Image (cartoon, rainbow, N blue to C red):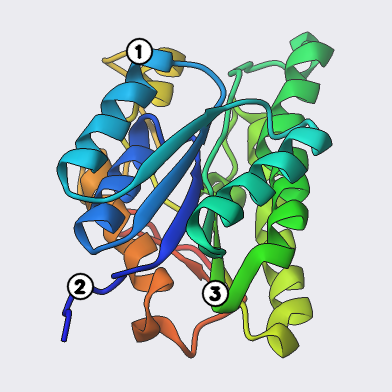
Amino acid sequence: MNKLQLYGKTALITGANSGIGKATALLFAQEGANIAIIYYSGDDDAEETKNEILSLGRQCIIIKGDINDNDFCEKVSKDVSDKFGGIDILINNAGTQFPCDDISKLQEENVRKTFDTNIIGMILLTKAVFPYLKDGGCVINTTSAVAYQGHEELLDYSATKGAIVSFTRSLALQSKDKNIRVNAVAPGPVATPLTKKTFGEEETDESKPPFERNATTEEIAPTYLFLATNASVQITGQVLHPNGGIIVNG
């Protein structure tokens, strides 16, 4: 009997060419899953991630596109399902952010792009994937500690992360009869290419967790693994908080 926790399963992961998504994709592959990755930019990173997964003996496909495009979401969902015979796990991880410490200076273009990427695209892709999710499948959404704490430089980003919490809870209620679990992960500060690009290497973060350091992506990925396995069979509509000890309610 194979002891790999995700042996024979298929996971579709957005934003998995780097950061938390990549770490999760590699961990899932190590546990036996075949991986489909949707990414928006970063061709070299996507190819590198694919090759790392293939080296683990798993199948992997990478698809470049915009999850804010409904036609793209429908096509990629069908293509992934056709190739792998259905989808077991959907991880909505893609995200973007544009810091601004003055609401009067928020740029409309950036606000709309943040919502399109972080929540609207998430809903569109989930809608498209849902008919292909197998019985007992699951959806795992990436939210953030800022949904609970707020962040003075990330007003619109924090708002989308709060929306993800509400979306997760509502879809979980709708999915009970379909035997599909829907949960979310809310990391605290994590060292990722996105945070490095946004804040630089020497960010002074006043919300630094009690552990006094940012998490690595490899430290966050096991939370997704737990939610994807039968070990969490009684968990749906919940948000898990691998945040280094930040106290939040919810």
**Residue 27 shown left or right of residue 43 in the figure:** left
In the image shown, does 186 or 223 lie closer to the viewer?
223
Mark yes or no: residue 204 visible.
no
The residue indicated by pointer 1 is 200
Looking at the picture, does residue 79 appear above or below residue 202?
below
In which quarter of the view is residue 65 placed?
A: top right
Q: Are marks 3 and 2 in contact (CB under 8 Å)?
A: no
Single out the mark in the foreground, 1 or 3. 3
In this picture, residue 62 sits left or right of residue 110: left
Q: Residues within 10 Å of mark 3 (few under 14, many from 20)?
A: many
Q: Is residue 54 visible?
A: yes
Tell me the quarter of the picture where residue 168 sits. Answer: bottom right
Q: Is residue 67 above or below residue 215?
A: above
Q: Secondary structure at mark 1?
A: loop
Side of 41 where 56 appears, left or right: left
**Residue marked by disc 2:** 4
Which of pointers 2 and 1 indicates the residue nearer the eye? 2
In the rendering, which numbered label is found on residue 37? none
Distance between mark 2 and mark 1 Cα atoms? 38 Å
Q: Looking at the picture, how far across and down is residue 120, in whole percent?
A: 78, 41
Q: Residue at x 33, y 47 (%)?
A: 59
In terms of sequence position, does the residue under pointer 3 or pointer 2 come before the other? 2
Closer to us: 158 or 39: 39
Return the x and y of residue 110 as percentages of the image width and height: 73, 16
Which image quarter holds the C terminus? bottom right
Residue at the image position 71 percent from the left and 47 percent from the top = 125
Name the amino acid, label 3: Gly
| Disc ID at residue 137 | 3
Tag 2: amino acid? Leu
